[in-house]
Image (tube, rainbow, N blue to C red):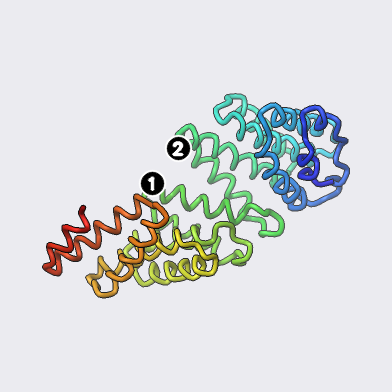
Amino acid sequence: MRLCFCLLVLSAKIFAEIPYPDSFLNQSFSYRVQCMKDFEHPFNQLDSTSKKACLQQLLQWAEDSKDSNLKFFFRWSSLKILFWIERQNPSIIMELESLINESGMCKDYFIQAEARQLLGYFYWDRKDFSLAIEQFAQAYALYSEFDLDEFPNKAEYTFDYGTKHQYFGDYQTAKIFYLQMWNSTPQDQMDNIISKTNTIAYCYRSLNQYDSALYYFHLAEEFAIKQKSDVWIGIISGNIANIYYIQKKYDLAIPLAERNIELSTRNRELVDLAMAKSMLSDIRRIQNNPKAAMQLSL
C-alpha cells in the first residue's frame, strides 16, 4: 500500500484508521524511501491537523513494528515530518541523537546516515554552522559507502554537501563534491538538473577556470532549452556573458547580455535584470558609447 494513496483521501479521522503497511515488510531501504517520496507531495497539501495526525500514525507504526530496521525507518520518517511542521522544535535534536545512537548500535547505517543528515539540516536552519557541518560530514562518511541504488538520496546529499562548502567560499572543496555527484549519477536521475549544472559552472567561474565554467554553462543552457525554461535561458545567457565580459570579449558578451535583459524583463527576474543592465552599461562605456550606457541606467 503506497502512502500517497492514503493521503489522497485523508482526513485526520480517516488517517487514524489506516492499517499498518505490511508492504513495507521485508523490503529494501531504497524501496521504503521511494514509498515515502510518493507520500511527500500529497502530505504538503494537508492542513496542519491532518499533518499532525499523519505524524502520530507514523510514530504508532514505529511502535507496532517488530522489525527493528522498519521501526527506525518510521521514526526517521516521523522526524522528517516534525521538521517540516515545526523546524525549531527542540525535541528534534534529542530524538535524532537517540535514533543515531540506536541505529548505529544495530548497524543500520542507512538510517544513521539519514538521521545525521536531518540533524545537520536542523542545525543549519538555526545557523549553528559548525554543528551542521559536523553532522553533514559524518552523514557523508556513511552514505558515500553505498551506491545510488542502495541509498537513493546519495546524489542529492553529496551535491548539497558541496553547496555548504561553497556557502563559505571554499569552491575547491565544493567542486570535488559536485563532480562526485555528476560523475556517479545518470542525468535522467538528477533532480533540478539545470540548477545543478549552473551551480557547477558558477563554481568553476569562481575558481577562474573559465573554459570549464563555459562548458557547464552551455550544458545548462542546453537543458534549459530542452525544458523550454525562458527564466533559466535568460539567467544562463547572463552568466555566459559575464565570462566573456571578464575576458574582454565584448562582441560575444553583448548579444547574450541583451538576451538576458529581454528574458529577465519578460519574466520579471528583477535582480538578474539589474545585473545584466549594469554589465552591458559598463561595456557601452568601455566602447565609448556613453549615451547607450546612460539609457541602460534609466
- Label of residue 81 in the image: none
Q: Is residue 192 left or right of residue 143?
A: left
Q: Earlier in the sequence, mark 2 or mark 1?
A: 2
Residue at 67% across / 31% down in the picture? 47
Question: Mark 1 = which residue?
Answer: 168
Hey, what amino acid is under mark 1? Phe
Image location of residue 153, percent across then percent down: 64, 52
Horizontal side, residue 36 vs residue 138: left or right? right
Q: Quadrant of residue 202?
A: bottom left
Identify the residue shown where x is 30% and y is 59%. Answer: 276
Instruction: Kindly identify the residue that appears in the image at 66 percent across and 59 percent down.
Output: 148
Question: Between 15 and 170, which is closer to the camera in this rendering?
Answer: 15
Give how far across and how far down residue 23 sits, in percent.
86, 46
Residue 174 location (% of width, % of height):
44, 55
User: CA separation, marks 2 and 1?
Assistant: 10 Å
**Which residue is at the front of the view, 75 or 190?**
190
Relative to 130, is 20 on the left or the right? right
Q: Position of residue 216 (x, y in %)?
A: 44, 68
Query: In the structure shown, which secondary structural element does the residue marked by tag 2 occupy?
Result: helix
- Element under disc 1: loop
Residue type highlighted by circle 2: Phe
**Do the residues bearing badges 2 and 1 touch, measured as CB atoms within 8 Å?**
yes
Q: Which residue is mark 2?
A: 129
Task: Say if 273 sits above or below 68 in the image.
Answer: below
